[in-house]
Structure formats: structure tokens, C-alpha cells
Amino acid sequence: MYDKLNEIREETLRRLNEAGDEKELEALGVSVLGRSGALTEILRGMGKLEKDERAKFGQTANLVKKELEDAISLRREKIAAAMQEKRFALEALDVTEPGVRKRPMGRLHPMTQTYRTIRDALVGMGFTTFDGPEVEYDEYNFTKLNLPKDHPARDMQDTFYVSERVVLRTHTSPCEARALLALEPPFRLVIPGRVFRVDEADASHSPVFMQMEGLVIDRNISLADLKGTIDAFVHAVFGEEVKTRFRPSYFPFTEPSAEVDISCTMCGGCGCRVCKGTGWLEIMGCGITNPHELENCGLDPREWSAFAFGLGVDRVASLRYGITHNRLQYENDARFLGQF
Amino acid sequence: MKLPLSWLKDYVEWNVTPEQLVEKLMWRGFEVASVETQMQEISGVVVGRIASLRRHENSDHLLVCAVDVGKGEPVQIVTGAPNVFEGALVPAALDGAKLAGGMSIKPTVMRGVQSLGMLCSGQELGLTEADYPGAGIHGILILEGERTPGQDIRQALGMDDVVFNIELTPNRADCQSVVGMCREAAAALGQTFREPAIKRVKGAGSAADYARVSVLNSELCPRYCARVVTDLNIAPSPAWMQKRLRAVGMRPINNIVDITNYVLVEYGHPMHAFDLACVKDGHIVVRNAHENEVVTTLDGKERPVSPETLLIADPEKGVGIAGVMGGLNSEITENTKATLFESAVFKGSNIRATTRSLRHTTDAAARFMKGVEPVNAMLALERAVELVDQLGAGKVVGDTIDVCAADTSERVVEADAAHINRILNTKIPAKDMADMLGSINIEAKAEGDTLVIRVPHYRVDIESGVEADWDIAEEVARIYGYYNIAPKLMEGSTFSGRVGEAFRDEDKLKDALAAQGLYEMYNYNFTGPAALEALRIPEGDEKRLAVKLLNPFGEDQSLMRTTLLPGMLDALARNLSRKTGHAAFFEIGNCHFDNNPDLPEERKLLGILLAGEGEDFFTLKGLIEEVCSRFYMEIEVAPGGGEYFQPGRKGVIHAGGEAVGELGALHPAVRKAWEIDCPAYYAELNVGELLPHKGATPTYKALPKFPKVARDIAIVVDESVTAKEARDVIEKARLKVVLDDISLFDVYRGQGIPAGKKSMAWSFTLRAEDHTLADEEIQTAVATLVRALQARLKAELRG
């Protein structure tokens, strides 16, 4: 009987390895362990044995049974794993095929993205947003800003007129006058908005463009504060490695005034087509607020001091994205807009 | 302004390169836009004398010239230009020469005859008629006067100067002159400015015997200086003067005109010379024009002038428009015997008004508008007569006529050095500041912390009073060097910056629109009457209340937009014709309505434009609903809307019961006007009216603990029953269970449905807060809904 048991064990283990799938394995299990299986038969014939012998054989037979059960279960897992592997192989994808874009994103205009970057940099420095009308009184656009009628500097900005006293604002600076009249100093403002000049559209000009103005008023504001603020702001928008250069200039609403250049964002300052070989890009105008402007807005320039700066968002966007012609920003060609 | 290096050298010791000067001027606030070397491209071109010429044996239009180029043996050059002749002095480009536009010259054989170079036209040398007489003609440039063959052509033409093009800021009108600019250049280079000394010509006799001047409006003409010159000898001006005038882009005419131009460039003061014989009684009257007066100006044009215009007249007639242009009737001609040189100050604002009403401006007018100054007027006049004397152009008569109402006394201003140091955040001693000012010829003395400054007559930009601190701070800063002022971060008050609510909402709105797949547009704010007409906007509609520009680019850009549609349609049409593959856009921008006596009403509008496959009225509506959901806001659409929509496919958008916009399919006539072939859908919402209806920050609602069951019902109703009516009935039905997720998933007309009726299929879910619904509860709820629909809408349950 022991021989028979051993034979069954070995036969089963051998056939186990031959079983290729779940079905064959199931059949094998039934033929050995099933109700009329070989092992079951042997256990059934055990009754003929002596009591002692029976107990001993029974123990051995149960061990074999357990062993075979375990072996079948192990084999079952192996087969299942192999089956799965096969299925996986069949289901394998070419992952380089293109993604399916069910809900393609739209795009924000490069100017919007640039405006937000600039604005957020300034908000991080304590500036708060401020707004004013696009169609504006001459009074705010010019006179209050130390540009009385017939001031020669009015020629710097060719103006669209609506009437004797109403213009399309030529800069965001009228909001300075509005803020200085309406708010209690000290404050720091960032003023974005559309402005208008009688300029035919070309590579770098547009009759409509977006400007951003910064205004800080406090006690003891100096040219050094202006330089430090603009440096910090330029680094936030263009990167830490970008250098600034302040050149003396003139604006009616500031004195002293400066033009700010940054080291060319295209070539890093070595000289290229974008910076016309100079290594520098003119980026904004700024200065200490002219005492006349403060006086015109009811503030004592001995008590309060201020600085202001203004830059073209279109221009910054062009530099940021390497846009070669300003007109592209107002043509709204989807192939252009889709790039940003 | 143009500053020739040769002229600069008269006043400044030159020991740097042009590039170094450019850099130094930049740090002083003078931007040099370009440095031009005259005839920079040209090399290897010399003066040639045509020693002899003959017809080409194989051509009837070519000439073979033997040209003396100063090398002994003449060179043979073939030319096709018929204007050469024996003895002519011409530009000869020899082997290896470079001409305008990068053309280079090599020996060649022309129809069997060797040509060792090329004879040049003015154009081939990059010259125009203004640069040299004859340069504009078609043919070889024939040089005037005596020249040495072999001389470099640039020297021969006097076109070898370096010219700095300086962009001046409007506050420095004094630098609109060679003298003023050289003063700054000398200081920038650390040199002493060699102040020009004018030798006053005393002259013989008295001007009063020839002329007198009456100024009837001294407000518009604060100073009028004049000198008389007799025995005029009108002739070309000398080469050195012509060379300098050409270098600054002026065309030499004759000695008298050239002198006024020369002084204009040198001193920045415009002058005029009248033929004294044409001024009745030699009496100059400076007065306003009479009603309906007409002056014929030097350019031969009859110009009607208004009483606001200041004229230079004699007792009978106008002889010039003050500060703008002289009259034809008193022009200097070759027969002029005696002249009156005028050097006057005219009020800039009046000159500006005059040029505006004449629609004509001149160099002289531009100077007056920038501002001229009375002391300089006299200097310029004395310089002019000095040149007359020097050139032998006439006899200078004694005495200067000077009608002066202007204050020409020296101004002394005080500035507070401590305040200047606060403005700049520097610690510059007052004494050093005084020295710095001295370096630009401003005499200043430090008395403690006070700077006492004698303002030179030409520095009209330096104000008296408290503002002087800022003016002097600017001077000190640019001399000290902006780069020497160390940047620092602001101290004092602290601020927490904020993005205001309207700005934040606009960000969020744009993000939501982009998330729906729209591309953002930026269009110009201009439109025109034709566009409004094409949009079928009726007369009297508020969209016709567009703000008009007084000086637009053209009719089609003469109005400020009252709707975003025209610009967006332009861009859509471009995208369709270029097949860019995208036709879903939005724009947020301001529109203006001229409905207000003060400033026009400014409305921030949102426009959404969709076209192409898959888009319809309801994709647009759904998009707006989705975007509004971002603001916890629901919209409703009722029939209605503007004329640019197709009737029956348009609606008014309501939020919180208020009309906030419109949407619809664009009218075929509108699409046709923009050549858009496919259906297009547009919505325009007033952002300022929409966003106030945004919902509050939501409060969390507990998630359902018991399952919901989905049901749907199809009902047949009259065509007139709207989806909103049906939905209202379903929503308001009194049920004992919770009704959610109501949705109209199908509307069907056709087979099986009687004419004039439609089938609506609604789905919804039912649940209870505290238990799982039993079948009977569900059946009761559905039955209640059906009954309500039957009762309120005469609906029938569909089979």
C-alpha cells in the first residue's frame, strides 16, 4: 500500500507539471483527490488494515494528500500568473501613440499671462491693484501730471482726442492722479490697463497696447528705493541673472527720471538681433514723482515723496516669448495663440 | 538732432572714439540713436577727369573714356551714360571699389573693350540731390569746381564727416543746437567747453534809417530783434558752410539763407531774412491776422489765416506767418539789395495752434514749439551778422533793433542740498554739488546746505522756488552718475499687497473660459460705422452710441467699439481663411457708450464666438452655464436678443433675474458680410453685471447615506411648451421623496408624434434622506410627477 501511495504521489507530481491550464489541473485534482480519485480510493481501502498499521498509514496518507493539495494550489497560482502574463502581452500598447485629448484646453493670450506674472511679482512686494477708465479726461491724462496744455512734452505722446477735454488715455498714469486724489498715503499700487497712441502699427508699435504702472508714495522715498524696487521686480519677472541699467531721461511727471534697460534676455548681453547688438533692452521708464504732480493732487511734496514706473506689457510679452512682430499679438491667429 | 563731429571739434577737445562719446552721453541723459559716417559704404572711388572719349566700336550707346585718376596713365572705363564730356570731373570707381548697397567693382570687358572701372551716378554713391547738386539726376555725377584727379571722392564731396544722431528729451530745448550739445558733450568728456565768442559787428549808419519794428502783441512775441544788411552780394555760401549744412541734412541755397540755417543749427534759434524793399516803409508790424486775411508763403501756397494767428506784416500786408514761414512777397532773391534779419521769440503754444490750423509745420515752427529763449535770440542774430560780415555777403548796418517785453535778467535760485541728498539717498557735500554744476557751466555756490545757483539763460528747464530742489537733484544725479546710487529696498511703512476682487474674478473667468477650450483674443478697440451697419444694429440702439474720435486713422477706425463682435469676427474670418484649425474664442475688453455728459460709460464685456463642426446654440449655452458654475451661479435664457442674431435662435441671458447678456446664432447676413460660410454662435455678457450675481462660498452638504434610483419618463406636449416650463413643473412637484439630477436627455419630433407636438424625455433620480426607497414609494413619486405634467402642461405619457 505504501508503494501504491508513493506511486500515486509521484505520478501526480509528475502530471502536475504537465498540466498546462486550469482545466487540466482541475481534472488531475479530481482524478487523485476527487470522490473516486486514486488517493481517495486508497484511503477508503485503509479499513482493511490493522488498527496500529491503519493509524500509521493514515498519517502518511494524509501527509501525502496535504502535499498534493498544496502542490496543486501552487501550480494553479503559477498557471494563473502565466495566463495573466500572456494576456498582458496581448494587451500591451505602443505608448508612443498620441494621447487622446477629449477636452483640449484653451489658451490665455500671452499678454494676459505676462500681465499676471508682472502683477503678481509686484503684489508680492506689497503693491495692490488699481484701475481707471480708458477714455479719460485730458485733466488727468496730462494737466495733473505736470503736462499743461501746450507743454512741449505733449508731443511725446500722440493723442487720440474725443473732445477738447476728453482723450483716449495715452498711458496708465492718469490713474496716479486718481489714486493720489482718492486714497490716503502711504500706498503702493500696480495699475494695468490699455492705452492708446496715434502710432501706426509696425514691428514695435501699436495704436493700442497694454501698460502697467507702479506707484509708491511714502515719506522719504528716494531714487535708491526706486532702483532697489525695480531690481527686485526685474529679477522676479525675468530671472535673477538679468542685470539692470538706469539711464538719465526725462518724463514730465517724474524728476529725476530714468529709462531702465535690462541685459538682453535673448543673448544674455553679448549682443544680438533683438538688442540690436547693444546687449541691452529698454524696458521701462521711471522716476521720482514730480513735485508738481503731488501738488496738483493736493499733497505737499516736502512731506510726501513718491516714485512711479511704467512698462509695456506687449513689449515684455514679446521679449519673454521671442515674438518678433508686435502685430501678431493683435491678429489672434489660433496658430499663434495656441503656442502659449 | 544731428551733430557732426567736425563741428563738435570747434568747441571740444576731441580725444576719444565716437563709441566712447556715445556711452558718456548716455550716462548724461542723451541718447545717441545712431552714429553715421557719411558715405560709409563707399570705398575705392576717386575723382576722375575725362581726358578723352570715343564711341564704342560695337555699340551705339556706350562710350569709351580715358580717365585721369591721378596715376599718370589714364585708365580706360566704358560708360553708358550720355552726360559725360571731355574735361568733366566725375567719380571713378576703380578695381575693388565698393558702392552703395554693397556693389563691388571689378575690371570687365564690355563688348570686346576692356573697362577697368566704373563712372558713378549720385545714386550709386548713395547720395541724393540734397547731398550734392546733380546727385539726383539720371546719369553720371558731374563734380563742380576745381578738383584734383585721384582725390578720394568722400573728401572731394566734403562727405567724410561722422554725424551723431541724438534723441533729445523735450526738457532740453537748449541742446537742440550745436553749441548746447557741445557744452554737454564737453562736460561728459571731462573737458572744458570752448565757449564760442561772437565778434559783434558794429556796422555803419543806423538801422533806424532803414527799418522800424512795432510789436502789437507782446504776449505772443515777447522779443523781436532785427538787424539790417545792405549791399547784398547774393552768392553760394563757402564750401565749409555747405559741407556742414549737408552733414545735418540741409540743402545749401545761397549765402543769406544758408547763414540763417547755419545759425539755426549752431544756436538753435530760427531766423528769417526779409527783402527790405518789399516791406513798405521798412516797417515791420507784428500783429494778429485780420478776419479773412490770406498770406502767400515762400512755398507759393495761399494760406488763409485766422485772427488767432500772429503775422509779420508791414503797414499794408502780411509778409510772413510768425514763426512758421516767410511770405513769398518778401522773399530773398538774387535781386535783393537790402535785408532785415529777424530773430524773434514767439510763444510756442500760439505757433502750435497756427501749425494746427494751417495743417502745416516747418523746422522753425518746431523750434518755437519746443521753446526758444530771448537771450539766445540776440546771440543768434549777432552770430548771423558776424557771418554776413565774414562771408562778405553784405554791409552790416549799425544798431540792433530790439523790441523786448521779456525778462532777460539773470535768475538766481536756491536749492537745499540736504533735500537733494534725501531725494537721491546720497551724502554728497553741498560744495561738491556746486562743483558738479560748475562742470556744466552752471555757476553755483554752497552756503551751508544751501546752493545758490545762477541759472544760465538757456536753462529754462530749471525752475525757481521749491521745485528747484528736484531740478538740481536731477542735474546732480546725472553728473554724479545714476550707477553710483546704490539700490536699496524700501523701508518704513509695511504693506500687504492684494489683487482686488474684480481683478481676481477676471482671472478666474478667463481660466474657466480657457478650460472650456477657448482661445483668448485681444482686438483693437476701434471700429467704424460700416461695421455697425453690417451688424444690422438699428438706428437708436445703444450700440450706435459709439464714442467718436476726432483724429482717427480712418473712417473704419473712427469709433470706440460698443460690442466686441466686429473685432472678433474679423479675427474669426482670418482664422477660417487661413485654416488655422481653431474657431472657438473669447475676449474680455472694455466697450464705451457715449450716453453721458462726462466720460462715456465704460463696460467690461465678455464675448464668446464659436464656429464650425460640433458647435450649436446649446454648446454655447452649455459653455456659459459651465463657466458660470465656477462662480456658483446659474443663468436662465429667455427668447430675445439683438438684430445680429438669427430670429428664433437667440436669447437673453439672465442671472439673478437680471438681463446680463445675449447669445445666439449669428444672422446669415452678418456672416455674409464677414465672409464666414459656416454657422457661428456668439454670446456677449456684461462682466460688471454678471459677476455681482456670483454665489457665496458654498457650505458643505452631507453626502446621501441611502442609494438613489434613476428613472426616466417621456411625455408628449405641444410645441409651445418650453423645456423650462416642463422643468419647472418637475422641480416644483410635491413629492415625499428627494428629486435630483433632473435632465432633459432627448427631444423628438416625427413618426409616432402628432404634428404640432413633440416628445420630451426626462431623466431624474429619487432617494430619501433616511431610508432606502421602497418600490411603492418610487411608483407613487413617478405617478405624482406624471399627473402634475398632465395637469399643468396637458402632457401625455408617451407609450
Image (spheres, rainbow, N blue to C red):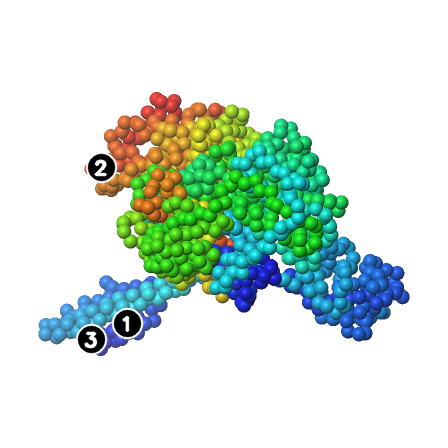
Task: Specify whether residue A298 is in view.
Answer: yes
Q: Position of residue A253 (x, y in %)?
A: 43, 46
Query: Relative to residue A276, is residue B342 depicted above or below?
Result: above
Q: Amino acid at mark 2?
A: Glu
Q: Amino acid at mark 1?
A: Thr
Query: Relative to residue B195, is residue B704 depicted above or below?
Result: above
In the picture of the structure, the residue carrying the numbered disc 3 is A1
In the picture of the structure, the residue carrying the numbered disc 1 is A12
The chain letter for the residue carrying disc 1 is A
Q: Amino acid at mark 3?
A: Met
The chain letter for the residue carrying disc 3 is A
Image marks 1 and 2: residues in contact by CB distance under 8 Å: no
Q: Position of residue B697 (x, y in %)?
A: 28, 40
In the picture of the structure, the residue carrying the numbered disc 2 is B769
Q: Are marks 1 and 2 on the same chain?
A: no
Select label 3 or label 2 by which is in front: 2
Which comes sooner in the sequence, label 3 or label 1?
A: 3
Q: Quadrant of residue B48?
A: bottom right
